[in-house]
Amino acid sequence: MGGFESIHVVLVPGADALAFEADIAAAAERGVLAHVVEYDPPKGHPIDDCEAYYQAVSMQIHAVAADIRAQAPDARVFGFGRNLGGSILAYHAARPDEFREDFQGLVMIGVIPELSTFRIHGDHSSAQRFRDSLSGPTEIARIGDIAPLDMTASLATHPVDRCLIQIGEQDDYMDDRAVAIFRKLESRFPSEWLDDVHAMAAPDTVARRWAFIEALAEGGRQS
Amino acid sequence: MMEKRSIIWFIVAGLLGGVLLNGAAFAAGKHTDGDSGVHTDEHGTPLGVPGDPHKVDRTIATSSRSITSTASRHCP
């Protein structure tokens, strides 16, 4: 069981709602309570309504964390965010209100570091579809408006020792621009380059993020 | 008698049509949660037209639900 007593993990999936099966199993093995945030995919304008969407999902994340603390005031709560869920979890942790205190540590799993850059320049089909979903060149020129929601922007003021970034070496969403951004981020945050794909659910990947929160929990207990 | 048979055939055809449409939507989508017809990739971008992943499938991209769900699931 190690250092997992009184730990709760909040799992924020990507917008495809891919289940965190490996992490739920890992939680059960360690006697940790896992809480999956279930949210709907984006609706509304992809640029103009983007922040409102992040805020709405952030409210859901806060509700889950608040519920945990209401039932277990001494709980240590960690957040795992995959893909878009990671972007939103980082946004949540950067909020200028009490929401930023919801988590003792975060793990960013397969998160595109700058969704705005990816969507402006990316050759990946997801980036091309995003541009295709807009009404034309005028809107495409405004994609940069969502840059404040990028993971890089959200983590700008985050405590460096409380966030792990996991990057898949086989992740086809991560283009050269993303890799260059991660190279800068890894000078600040613990970062792991792993033999994994976008879902980041390989056994070694899962084991490493659990080791990270166990170490954080141990440190928190000693301080 | 003839009318009754027509009604039954109408209902059967409707049910079959529904099953086929649902199946096609599932095949085209990365994920569907059963009742919503929501189809996006991991980053919330609408999925592509079958055969052209770079183009948005507007027939399903417009069917997304509201963002007001508050559900969470606990996994002890």
Image (spheres, rainbow, N blue to C red):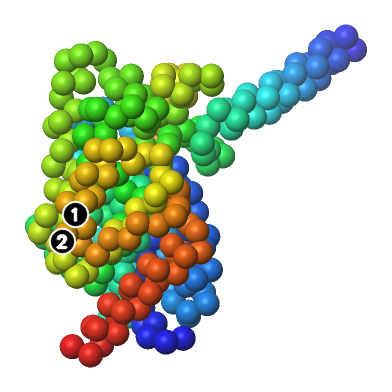
- Which sits in the foreground, B17 or A189? A189
User: Mark 2 and mark 1: span between their CA atoms?
Assistant: 5 Å
Quadrant in which residue A143 is drawn: top left
Residue depicted at x 33% and y 73%? A213
Of the residues shown, which amino acid type is indicated by label 1? Leu
Chain letter of the residue beneath label 2 in the structure image = A
Hey, what amino acid is under mark 2?
Answer: Arg
For residue A86, above or below residue A66: above
User: Which residue is label 2 attached to?
Assistant: A188
Q: Position of residue B41 (x, y in %)?
A: 42, 36
Cβ–Cβ below 8 Å for labels 2 and 1? yes
Q: Is residue A187 left or right of residue A6?
A: left
Q: Residue at 21% of width from left, 34% of height from top?
A: A117
Residue at image coords 21%, 58%: A186
Tag 2's secondary structure?
loop
Q: Nearer the viewer, residue A115 or A45?
A: A115
- Residue A54 percent across, percent down from the top left: 24, 45
- Residue A185 circle label: 1
